Amino acid sequence: MHTTIAEMIRLVGSERVLHEPEHLLTYGFDGTACLTGKAGCVVFPKTTEEVAAIVRYAAEHKIPVVTRGSGTGLSGGSVPSSQCLVLCLVKMNQVLELDEKNLTVLVEPGVITQKISELADSVGLLYPPDPGSIKISTIGGNVAENSGGLRGLKYGITRDYVMGLEVVLASGEIVFLGNKCVKDVAGYSIKDVFIGSEGTLGIITKILLKLVPKPSARKTLLATFSRMDAAAETVSAIIAAKIIPCTMEFLDKITIQCVEAYTQIGLPLDAEAILLMETDGHPVVVEEEAIKIEAIARSCGALSVQVARTPEEAGRLASARRAAFSALARISPTTILEDATVPRSELAGMIRFIQTTAEKYQVRIGTFGHMGDGNLHPTFLTDENNHAEMERVEKAMAAIFDYAVEQGGTITGEHGVGLAKKKFLPKALGTASLNLMRQLKRTLDPDGILNPGKIFD
Amino acid sequence: MTPLEQRQRDIVHIGHSSPEGASAPAHALKKLDYSVLQQCIHCGLCLPTCPTYDATQFERNSPRGRIALMRAVADDEMRITRAFAEEMYFCLGCLACQTACPAGVNYAEMFEHARSDIERGGVLANPQRTLIRTLTLRWLFTRPRLLRTIGRLLYIYQASGMQALVRRLRLTVLLPRKLRELEPLTPTVNRHFSDALIRPVEKPIAMKFRVGMLTGCVQDLTFSDVNRDTVDVLLANGCEVVTPRNQSCCGSLHGHNGEMELSRKMARRNLDSFPDLQQLDSIITNAAGCGSHLKNYEHLLADDIHYAARAKLWTEKLKDVHEWLGEIGITPPSQPMPVEVTYHEACHLCHGQKITRQPRDVLKAIPGLKLVELPESTWCCGSAGIYNITQPEMSQTLLERKMDNITKTGVKIVASANPGCAIQLQNGARAGNPELQVLHPISLLARAYRAHGDHV
């Protein structure tokens, strides 16, 4: 590692290379529970050329490269493998171009997602993907994990907004994939391969994003329920009525209590479940949809339906929801977040299955999630030092993943596979699909230096 | 390279540094309830609120990075090294991370234990540092009479024009380098201290409550007028005010700087100075940094069989003055005071005590006063106890950011409720915004009362 460190210092200067134990320890984890690793050194490039030079060196010496941004990932995707070179892109944080004619923005990967959102807002545009960690997550990480967020139902996910990518390949070559054209069928859509590739196929160094006009009106509703499946039925009924709200967020009782303890915004502590719903668009349509949503919620057994009075109040409700995962950590020493996802039609069944599984294995699960797109976050509240309980957690988790896959769903809706869900992947994909992915990996990264051991071995 | 860029480089260098030196094992961190260390799920939501992470973008300089280091030390995976120690002193202790943390991590407790271990292990010890710590923490700030005597001498030096003369003749070059750099930061000492301005018991016209008044140490030397204002405001709101004589430091300086035992000693002394605790409805502090620590006496003395019960009662009764006024309701001044004011939130008020609405309510209670919100009002001003002395580069950067935000408001009065912030902001004003007045919110309210002879 000594030669590598010396070479890195030669390439970017000693100020941007960390190798001391006190530094390395703090790059040993991301936002995922129970996963740590120890890097050999951490390098902070500032330009694509520096990234390319670092990768060329790594390729030549067969040194594993683990790319990361702010380290908020939830599947261990940026946990370093032993003696790897961590490529931390937070200092590549420039917005390069805002093109209001083509509604695009070109950014470096270390730009914080919130900053893109604010920039778009300042010119009357919207960058819709808003993952829970939006305030600190980097856009590079969002693209690498194909992050979702609260607005997935209507606006889609990160993939739907990526028009182009500059990528440094495992060989150190630099390619730009995509452009500002809405239509482009020249050759394979290779950029899509890199979206959600979790740093295993190449290193994203520039991102061309699509922006959309900001909706002129929005309305936020909060419905409370005495049964969890009544909330799920409400979601199905709203969609069946051909209404697509931008947000339909679900929180169960434990989650409500934790979020309220943190935010103190007056969430109903006695409800078994709440739905936070938002509709946006033309003011007339928004008004009409809000009335319909309220009526449907009531007919499905909602105890109460409240409309946020001001944009600030709506904003507070959305931020409260974004804090759900971290707030659940108040309950127990270890908090393991999953994101099993099913087609929307199977939601009520999934919710019931999570409940019975928790009872069966005697584990505590707090559930929240993006109900509108079937993406749930059953969260295990446990203690990693209690081995007997951890075994039961493992079993319950496996049962939930199996059930999700059986219902035509997936083991991860938006967090990625990384290390945390690696062992569940073969069952979810099947042999042929998995082999195709392996082939692709071997083609793009023949020496296996890019984020080795993530997604699959 | 501009001086600003140079300073930014220096900060990155401080955040980066890994000096060699002695190492020591953990002690206090090991005794800490493990659930406190385990509470952090390293989700990263604290990162954007941390001024040191913001400056360097190195994980080690972030709350979750520091927590990971402290946990590693408690788990014996790492020893207390010089780099660990420097990191813990690079942290401002502003506690913005605690406000941001949805998981409710008690960073303050961990961090005080870590600094205690650092001092116990002596990894930062050198003759100069030991001398300064002995003179200040062990000597000056444990002896209220001595502190006031020194304050008196400083007042004479400043009031006689000597200080101005020394500065004009640049005689400060005769001082050792470190002291020379600090000299401009010397706060202006008031002519009269609190005991001369406030009688032991003062009664309002119609008494509704009986409260104890804490006059502080730095607050007493440099802002005794704020203490007088506080008593006036309390009187105007129906509180009889009991002010024990010759009060001691609350011990927050000791607690934040790794001297837990001294901190407990100061807490006991403060408890002793209020023998009639039972008879008081509340004990009032007007200094945010002290208040945050004073509220922690229950926890600090939990294992002290002689003091635990009294400390519990103390914590129950301890109120920041804005908080107390919020509870009892503010009698508005009768006449308007048309001024524009912006409000800088002291970290240990908004993050340490979660008091954000009440000081604004105090200001809004003044008819005619227009409150202009300060951008980034909860971002640390860089004072942070003695941080402006120990980490001048980072402190100066934060001060400039704060002063820029204040300038953006266009307002010429900034209100703030902590002596450290006030001194820091006054230094900032002297450097680039000479018309700016720095005032305690309570002083503004007191002025409004006084202007029309309301009250007392």
Image: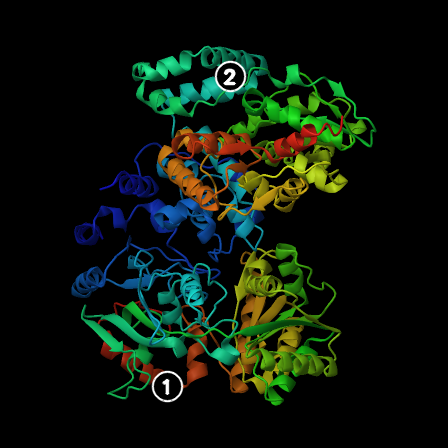
| A163 relative to B109 in the view: left or right | left
Element under label 1? helix
Q: Quadrant of the N terminus of chain B?
A: top left
Q: Is residue A101 visible?
A: yes
Question: At 17% from the left edge and 64% from the top edge, which residue is drawn?
Answer: A56
Between B267 and A122, which is closer to the camera in this rendering?
Answer: A122
Point out residue A115 in the picture as x, y percentages from the top left corner.
Answer: 41, 61
- Residue B33 in view: no
Tell me the chain of label 2. B
Residue A436 drawn above or below residue B49: below
Across and down, in percent, residue A74 comes to: 46, 65
Chain of the residue under label 1? A
What colour scheme was applied to this rendering of the protein? rainbow
Q: Please state which amino acid type lies under the numbered disc 2.
A: Trp
- Quadrant in the rendering for residue B361: top right
Q: Is residue A151 above or below residue A3?
A: below
Amino acid on which the number 1 mark rests in the picture: Ser
Q: Residue at label 2?
A: B139
Near-viewer residue (B450 or B115): B450
Residue carrying label 1: A433
